[in-house]
């Protein structure tokens, strides 16, 4: 656990969670500092997306606590966590395909819908960041290309100017050049003070853009450390991913 | 001008269909629920309105039956359990406000009941909505009395409100219906396009979980759409009642026409729904106006028209309708049924509760022995009773046989072959009238009538069997429902059929030589028919044919890969199912001798799906339970309320909802699980059609997957073996 004098933005402490009778997460500890970019790595089925669900309030932990900005949010509903400043880019794009681009963005601004001026301003800002979205505002989200869809998903999560954005599989199915473009945008957002929790299977990409990384295996944090250091120790990476690969096969 | 008038009436009637359809589309858009309870909601709201409205004329027409009643169900109608209440007479606007509040309340209740099913397949949702429909209709009978009556028009029809224009007639009420429909369609469409809440409803429909991640309260949003849908249904009910009369069943029937309208809009487009309703109304009126409609002895043909239109639409699948919905892989029409876990399977909790051992369970610990004792003992009792009793109990038991046979037809068709049919009771009607013609008119003997009846049912089976080749799940159910309604309201009322309504007695000769009463004879004859059918079914279950059925049910693509011909086997399943039900119909005809077309109402067909699911739709034993629990037991407990005993429907509907909640596959059967809770095999026979509500992930993970392989081994069907891996 990195020691800093700041209070952590997001902190999971001893979190157990699961579906029905099946436990997926076992005593997970994870910390995201304000403005930090954190990677959450692991093989398929390790429980990465479950952690995101627990944080966003779609699932509640069986044991342990989740706190955000010092407040215990373990039992919060999704609409509360969104209002508190946590947004998510769901895996597999997670757009609303039968809504237009603009309507998707409006739904991203759901929590501030009563403040019309702010909604308008926020959406206009997203369209500045991603001019393509502005051009295609009337188009159905389901008809966008893969890169545009991911732009929309990012833009939609950014409408609220969250304190923490969680991204489930940024790079999945996208060409490297497009991923690089998105990473640049994320970098700018981070510069402006937004913390990022990046869930990835693509370890090299994740480690090269993050400050800190956690490795999840079978629902447990196997190890964590500075991304830069981990990137140099490919023996560690290989042990995790190859072990996972053999078990999975 | 002759046709112009009919077209105009078609537009008026079609407007009301469109309003029903609008409610259905709104609910389906937002929640994926094909809401069969919509008609019952509209009916209830219409009853509330006309009972309250001072100008309805109902107080004069019904006198002491014009108020509200409530009878606590299950208490057998004792006077201390009955309440009646004569509401104050209200002006129209006040009655309307109250009626809309009732609609909103019903919408909220249904929304709450539906909440745990948000990830269920469309078919499971449909069955839950049947349950709600049954309960609601039962309660409505309980509260409003089943008396039919005419009501006054909303705008009194007199010289000042009726207009003539060169032989073209119309009145203000008709204009109002059209105007209200147009205004509501535009308003609702604008609501979904232009308002934040409307877009949020569409967002939740698209992807519930993603919407929640955006901070949208999915449950609240669903509530709004249910309230909106119920209100639209209520308005439709209020508008159409002056035209067709205030009657619980006639109004509930309109659901089918509403579904056709919705289908035109692909269950998605409101404008399409409006157009669909209008087209349907106009076609129906033109058929009535045409020379076909003039043929003597024909009943009004709207339901037959609806059936033809629904089949045509679904078979031709015009692109403008079906761009959005996938009819083939319909399990999750529209929104994907994403399998994110969440809830603990209710099944586990239920089983844990059972294990703790309520008294019943302790008694049935040794169920393997006990069931033989109970079964044989019960069988013997059933056989002997008709000898010693008078006609009443043998009639009851013979009805039990009829119900059992209908149950059997569903076991084969739905349980094994996976084809959901709401029309099996309509086949009883087909069989009964066929038997009446063969026996009463052609004077054939019983032992010839039954096999011939079964043969003659085949073309009828093909009528719904052929659409099944291109349709699955909910859409197939819709076709069968339309068929049942068309048969019930059109075919059986046609003079050519209706006049043949009595059979010859099975045996000739005077009563003095009879060892038993006539009904006892029918009972034993029926028993012989039933035993023959069960013998066939029992052997069928062990044959390659039944394994092909199961394979088709579980995964059609896999079955095809293994060389199973879906066309042949599906049609065969429909023919066997229809044949068994028709045999039941022959027994029915002999039992009741003189028949009445209202004996075969479509809602019985809907009820039977519920019965089947409660008793275990993939089990032969389930069919027997259908007969015992729903034909015999009610008579033991019977105290009719307002002429109809509502206890069983209410109980059945409620249990149905609970069953789908606990056993989403619909195949385990609540009652069967009650006696054999540890039997894993049934739950595993989870067809694509009836696939789990809670989602594959938790079921697969919770260790029940092991049994899957076991079932596959036992059945050896390719589809299941594939699934078992």
Image (tube, grey):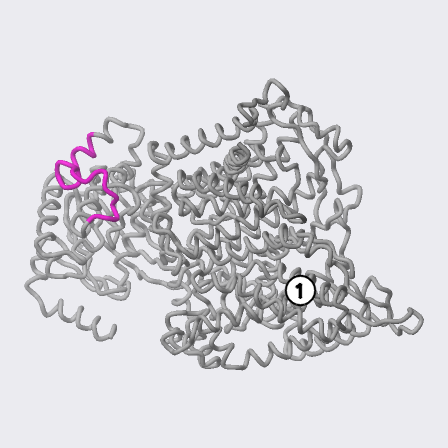
Q: Residue B578 occupies which quadrant of the picture?
A: bottom right
Does residue A134 appear left or right of residue B214 in this picture?
Answer: left
Residue B191: within the magenta?
Answer: no
Q: Name the residue under label 1.
A: B431
Task: Report x, y in % for residue B611.
Answer: 61, 60
Does residue A5 appear left or right of residue B420 in this picture?
Answer: left
Q: Residue B507 occupies which quadrant of the picture?
A: bottom right
Residue A138: within the magenta?
Answer: yes
Q: Which of A92 and B396 is in front in this view?
A: B396
Query: Magenta span covers which residues?
Result: A121-144
Task: Report x, y in % for residue B197.
Answer: 37, 35
| Residue under the point 52% across and 61% down | B464
Q: Which residue lies furthest to the left in this view?
A: A232
Task: Pick the quarter of the image with the C terminus of chain B.
Answer: bottom left
Q: Residue furthest right?
A: B512
Does residue A128 appear left or right of residue A70 in this picture?
Answer: left
Main secondary structure type of the part rendered in magenta: helix
């Amino acid at each position: 656990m990195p020691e800093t004098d700041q209070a952590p933005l997001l902190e999971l402490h001893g979190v157990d969670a699961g579906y029905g009778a099946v436990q997926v997460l076992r005593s997970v500890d994870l910390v995201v500092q304000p403005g930090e970019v954190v990677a959450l790595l692991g093989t398929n089925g390790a429980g990465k997306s479950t952690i995101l669900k627990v944080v966003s309030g779609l699932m509640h932990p069986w044991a342990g606590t989740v706190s955000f900005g010092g407040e215990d949010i373990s039992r919060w509903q999704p609409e509360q966590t969104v209002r508190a400043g946590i947004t998510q880019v769901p895996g597999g794009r997670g757009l609303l395909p039968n809504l237009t681009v603009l309507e998707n963005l409006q739904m991203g601004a759901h929590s501030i819908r009563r403040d019309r001026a702010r909604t308008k301003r926020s959406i206009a800002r997203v369209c500045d960041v991603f001019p393509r979205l502005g051009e295609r505002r009337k188009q159905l989200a389901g008809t966008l290309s893969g890169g545009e869809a991911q732009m929309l998903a990012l833009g939609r999560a950014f409408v609220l100017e969250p304190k923490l954005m969680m991204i489930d599989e940024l790079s999945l199915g996208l060409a490297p050049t497009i991923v690089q473009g998105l990473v640049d945008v994320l970098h700018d957002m981070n510069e402006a003070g937004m913390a990022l929790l990046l869930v990835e299977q693509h370890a090299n990409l994740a480690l090269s853009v993050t400050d800190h990384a956690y490795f999840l295996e079978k629902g447990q944090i196997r190890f964590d450390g500075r991304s830069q250091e981990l990137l140099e120790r490919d023996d560690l990476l290989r042990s995790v991913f190859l072990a996972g690969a053999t078990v999975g096969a | 001008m002759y046709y112009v008038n009919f077209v105009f009436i078609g537009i008026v009637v079609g407007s009301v269909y469109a309003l029903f359809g609008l409610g259905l589309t709104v609910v389906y858009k937002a929640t994926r629920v094909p809401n069969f309870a919509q008609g019952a909601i509209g009916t209830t709201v219409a009853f509330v309105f006309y009972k309250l409205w001072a100008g309805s004329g109902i107080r004069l027409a019904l006198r002491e039956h014009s108020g509200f009643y409530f009878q606590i169900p299950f208490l057998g109608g004792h006077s201390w359990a009955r309440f009646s209440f004569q509401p104050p007479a209200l002006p129209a606007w006040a009655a309307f406000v109250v009626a809309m509040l009732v609609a909103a309340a019903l919408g909220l209740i249904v929304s709450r009941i539906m909440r745990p099913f948000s990830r269920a397949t469309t078919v499971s949702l449909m069955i839950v909505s049947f349950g709600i429909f049954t309960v609601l209709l039962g309660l409505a009978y309980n509260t409003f009395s089943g008396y039919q009556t005419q009501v006054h028009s909303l705008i009194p029809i007199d010289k000042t409100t009726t207009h003539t224009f060169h032989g073209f007639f119309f009145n203000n009420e008709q204009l109002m219906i059209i105007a209200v429909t147009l205004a509501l369609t535009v308003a609702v469409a604008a609501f979904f396009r232009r308002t934040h809440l409307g877009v949020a409803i569409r967002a939740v429909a698209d992807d519930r979980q993603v919407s929640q991640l955006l901070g949208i309260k999915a449950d609240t949003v669903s509530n709004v759409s249910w309230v909106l849908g119920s209100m639209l249904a209520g308005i439709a009910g209020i508008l159409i009642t002056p035209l067709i009369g205030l009657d619980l069943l006639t109004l509930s029937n309109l659901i089918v026409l509403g579904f056709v309208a919705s289908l035109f809009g692909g269950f998605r487009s409101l404008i399409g729904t409006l157009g669909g309703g209008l087209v349907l109304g106009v076609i129906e009126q033109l058929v009535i106006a045409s020379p076909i409609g003039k043929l003597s002895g024909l009943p009004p043909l709207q339901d037959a028209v609806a059936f033809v239109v629904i089949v045509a639409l679904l078979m031709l699948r015009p692109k403008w309708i079906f761009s959005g919905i996938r009819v083939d892989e319909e399990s999750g029409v529209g929104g994907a049924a994403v399998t994110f876990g969440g809830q603990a399977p209710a099944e586990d909790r239920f089983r844990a509760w059972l294990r703790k051992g309520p008294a019943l369970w302790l008694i049935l610990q040794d169920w393997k022995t006990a069931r033989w004792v109970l079964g044989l003992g019960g069988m013997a009792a059933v056989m002997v009773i008709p000898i010693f009793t008078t006609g009443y109990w043998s009639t009851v038991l013979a009805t039990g046989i009829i119900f059992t046979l209908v149950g059997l037809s569903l076991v084969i068709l739905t349980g094994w072959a996976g084809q959901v049919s709401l029309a099996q009771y309509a086949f009883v009607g087909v069989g009964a009238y066929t038997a009446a013609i063969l026996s009463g008119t052609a004077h054939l003997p019983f032992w010839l009538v039954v096999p011939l009846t079964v043969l003659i049912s085949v073309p009828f089976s093909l009528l719904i069997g052929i659409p099944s080749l291109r349709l699955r799940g909910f859409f197939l159910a819709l076709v069968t429902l339309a068929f049942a309604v068309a048969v019930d309201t059109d075919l059986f009322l046609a003079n050519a059929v209706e006049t043949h309504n009595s059979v010859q007695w099975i045996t000739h000769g005077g009563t003095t030589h009879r060892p038993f009463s006539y009904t006892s004879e029918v009972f034993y004859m029926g028993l012989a028919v039933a035993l023959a059918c069960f013998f066939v079914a029992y052997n069928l279950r062990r044959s390659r044919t039944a394994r092909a059925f199961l394979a088709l049910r579980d995964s059609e693509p896999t079955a095809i890969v293994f060389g199973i011909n879906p066309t042949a086997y599906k049609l065969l399943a429909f023919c066997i199912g229809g044949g068994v039900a028709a045999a039941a119909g022959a027994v029915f005809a002999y039992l009741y001798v003189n028949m009445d077309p209202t004996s075969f109402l479509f809602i019985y067909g809907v009820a039977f799906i519920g019965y089947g699911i409660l008793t275990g739709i993939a089990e032969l034993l389930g069919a027997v339970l259908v007969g015992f629990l729903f034909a015999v037991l009610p008579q033991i407990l019977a105290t009719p309320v307002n002429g109809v005993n509502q206890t069983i429907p209410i109980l059945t509907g409620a249990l149905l909802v609970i069953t789908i909640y606990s056993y989403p596959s619909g195949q385990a059967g609540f009652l069967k699980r009650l006696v054999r809770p540890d039997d894993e095999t049934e739950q595993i026979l989870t067809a694509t059609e009836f696939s789990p509500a809670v989602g594959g992930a938790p079921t697969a993970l919770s260790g029940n997957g092991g049994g899957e392989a076991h079932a596959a081994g036992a059945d050896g069907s390719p589809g299941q073996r594939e699934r078992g891996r």
